[in-house]
Amino acid sequence: MEIRKELPEIFDEFAEARRNGFIAAKNLKEKNIPMVGTFCTYMPQELPLAFGAAVVSLCATSDETIQEAEADLPKNLCPLIKSSYGFGKTDKCPFFYFSDIVVGETTCDGKKKMYEYLGEFKDVHVMELPNSQATKEGFQLWKSEIIKLKGILENKFGVEITEEDIKKAIKLKNQERLALKNLYEIGKLNPPAMSGMDILKVLYGSTFKFDKNDTIKEVNELADRVRKEYEEGKRLDPKPRIVVTGCPIGGVTEKVVKAIEDNGAYVVAFENCMGAKAIDRLVDESNEDVYDALAEKYLNIGCSCMTPNPNRIELLSRMIDEYEADGVVDVILQACHTYAVETLSIKRFVNGEKEIPYMSIETDYSQSDIGQLNTRMAAFVEML
Ligand code: BJ8
């Protein structure tokens, strides 16, 4: 077996996508293409895509503006919220700057209160997300919020969004999900074909590429290439296999994924919002009612802001089995209460039903806990 040391440079091209995305965003604006900013996976991207707008994620990933954010927001608040607000407030994020409208949702308390302040200097629309997926009333509320968003976008941009347009956007977005799945499901191979860091580069980078057709093609080609090389014998060393769950990890990738992989394991799958939580479930193209289809897909995202939250357990369970996980690492961003409270049920499930080790870590966007994280990760991997 040839042990793979050199990974394709194309992974780095995806890692560069965020930086190149600034220029791409500027080009879109010069062509008068509307841009819709989003902070959350619940935002039905098909609606802006249906009238040719670009969608960009505004969740900030560095601590650069946290100090400025803390002038307005409490220190003891999730770094994703502080950092995102800080980049908006200081005009340091070109994606925020270029966004014509920001669409938020009533997910966690910190985010929804932050949107009120964001609305003071940006056009913000907040969708009312129900707290539960289990009731008919909740479903109807979310469906009506999706229809309301369509009206908001139509008014704002002076366009008409037809059901035919939405159907086309559903197809396109599903194709993108399938391409990204095609790529991240490479993580099922044992021994692995690519590291978790490389999987993440593609998943994260793809959110800053605005031509969906190009992205679909590129991601599928990359996945085919990695599978072909794997069959030819290019593989990574067998090591313990970790599934990562919890909060979005854009701002702590270096600390968490690198700490896992530097200390003797591989991340083979991401259950969180940069991975399967956002991608796993497609929109049902056979449903004639496009709003029903969108409401069904998005409302079923297994985020800890839902009560109860069985869909997170269901997805995690499938992933532990399909990716032959040896352990689960649950990443909690500091002061994220819903994910922190849910650690108990995730631990019970992983240790009890799945009978594999579980570790939760609480971290923020600073560099101060890198040493401690590495020590904990090394001890955890040793145990596997
Ligand atoms: S669907 S995970 S992107 S809400 S901001 S909840 S970390 S305290 S991001 Fe999220 Fe949508 Fe859910 Fe996904 Fe906690 Fe921070 Fe809140 Fe956060």
Image (spheres, grey):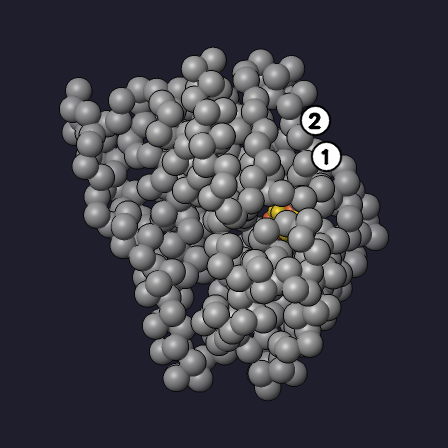
Residue closest to the eye, 72 or 8: 72
Q: Which amino acid does label 2 sit on?
A: Leu
- Residue drawn at (20%, 32%) of the image: 5
Q: In this view, does 106 lie above or below 348?
A: below
Horizontal side of residue 341 vs 19, given as left or right: right
Give the number of the disc on residue 344.
2
Mark 2 vs ligand 1: CB under 8 Å? no
- Residue drawn at (51%, 73%) of the image: 91
- Residue drawn at (23%, 27%) of the image: 235
Q: Can residue 212 be seen in this view?
A: no
Q: Can residue 26 be seen in this view?
A: yes
Where is residue 267, by image quadrant? top left
Q: Position of residue 131 (x, y in %)?
A: 78, 48
Q: Where is residue 274 in the image (x, y as percent from the top left)?
A: 49, 47
Q: Is residue 33 above or below residue 193?
A: below
Residue closest to the eye, 180 or 263: 263
Give the number of the disc on residue 341.
1
Spatial CA distance of label 2 from label 1 is 7 Å
Q: Position of residue 260 (x, y in %)?
A: 42, 29
